[in-house]
Image: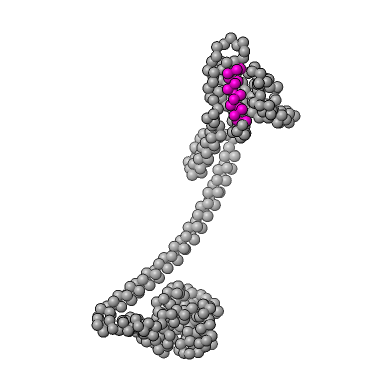
Amino acid sequence: MAAIDIFALVPECESLFAPMIRVRHKIVLKHMGENYTLRGGNAKNRVMEELARDGHAIGRDTVSGYARVYHLAYLYYHGEKIEEINTWIAQDNVYTRPLAIMLRNGVTRWEQIVALEEARKAREPDMVIGEVLEEHHATEAATVRSEENEHPDEVMKALHTVFSAYSRMRSEAETLHEQIELALQEITELREEVWKLRASLIAKDREIGRYVAAQPSTDIKILDEMALRYPTLFNRFAGLSEAIREEGRRRNAIPQELPTKAVWMGDPGNTQAPREVDIHYAESYLTFYKGTQENIRTQMVKQLNLLCAQGPSYSSFDTKPIAPGQFHNSPEGARYSKINNEGHRFTWTFNPRENVLTLHDAGIEENVIKVQRTYRRH
């Protein structure tokens, strides 16, 4: 009698193993005797050769592990090493885990295994269920037998339906497993393709850099040619340029509390009538304004309004013309006035022809002058 595939008799036990492992089990069982030991001295080599031909190459230790799982179950069902095997079951040992599932499903005697195998061969699933339930659920089994006596055809039909559904789901599970394996393989191949495309993109990016660097000018025709050859990269560069411009616009945005128009009164004794002027702000002025403390910003707004309302000769301004090169962020002819008594100053110019007041820079006077002196030495 050939070795019975013990763990194929209980669905829960069989589902413990992946389809690939079940294939290996079947090949190992072909080389086992009735006492579930490998037949002959070269049995392991024969198993390994057959597995390798089927694309399941494994080592000798793995073959021994598969055989040990079946052999321990055989010993238990024949009353050998019961205490030792029960200890392993309690420890959830990997070699006795399938046996523990068999016992939990009520398969506790070798006679049951033989009956289950015969029922499987005869394709009578009701016999399989009856045998499993007989020992493990005596009361439930009695109820089932009573119902079988009353409605044997209906019970038989229901059991056939259940096992047909199980067989169908098992087949679907194996199919899904194969599909998952194929999907994982496709993902690996796609990942490799992405890396290849990335390397190609980097190479093209470098080629563009070398090409542009070698040109004597940025002629429109050259740029058009490059845009046609590498549209993706040029779109990316265009997006980057727009992002830089947008950041510049954000940085240069005028805060709401700073006036953009005012009535310019001019110096005392000025014969010209008050006029409305536009107020422009240089980037260096806005950078300092946005980065300084709130109390200093309040003082800056106050002094700007006073400059327009009282004129640059107002006593609190201490207005002076800047020396040549003194403030590198301000043009020649600009003047600087006081923000507060802590040394903060701002520079400005007024264009009477265009009626434009421009704020050029602001900061602590000593720091600005120190920077300028360093700048002038170079």
Left of 369 or right of it: where is 115?
left
Residue 355 drawn above or below residue 31: above
Which color scheme does this rendered protein use?
Answer: one colour
Q: Nearer the viewer, residue 334 or 18?
A: 334
Q: Is residue 205 visible?
A: yes
- For this view, does 128 lie left or right of residue 231? left
Disc count in the image? 0
Question: What is the magenta range?
Answer: 296-311
In the figure, 178 relative to 267: above or below? below
Quarter of the image for residue 157 reads: bottom left
Q: Is residue 54 visible?
A: no
Question: Of 1 and 248, which appears nearest the observer?
Answer: 248
Instruction: Establish if 250 lies above or below 278.
Output: below
The quadrant the N terminus occupies is bottom left
Residue at screen point 54% across, 37% down: 247
Residue placed furthest toward the right:
377
The image shows residue 332 at horizontal and vertical percentages of: 66, 21
Front in this rendered view, residue 295 or 235: 295
Quarter of the figure with the C terminus: top right
**Magenta-drawn stretch contains 302:** yes
The image shows residue 330 at horizontal and vertical percentages of 64, 25
Image location (x, y in percent) of residue 3 = 44, 86
Q: Residue at x 60, y 11 (%)?
A: 270
Which of the two residues, 174 or 158, is positioned nearer the viewer here?
158
Secondary structure character of the magenta stretch overall: helix
Percent position of residue 244, x then y: 54, 37
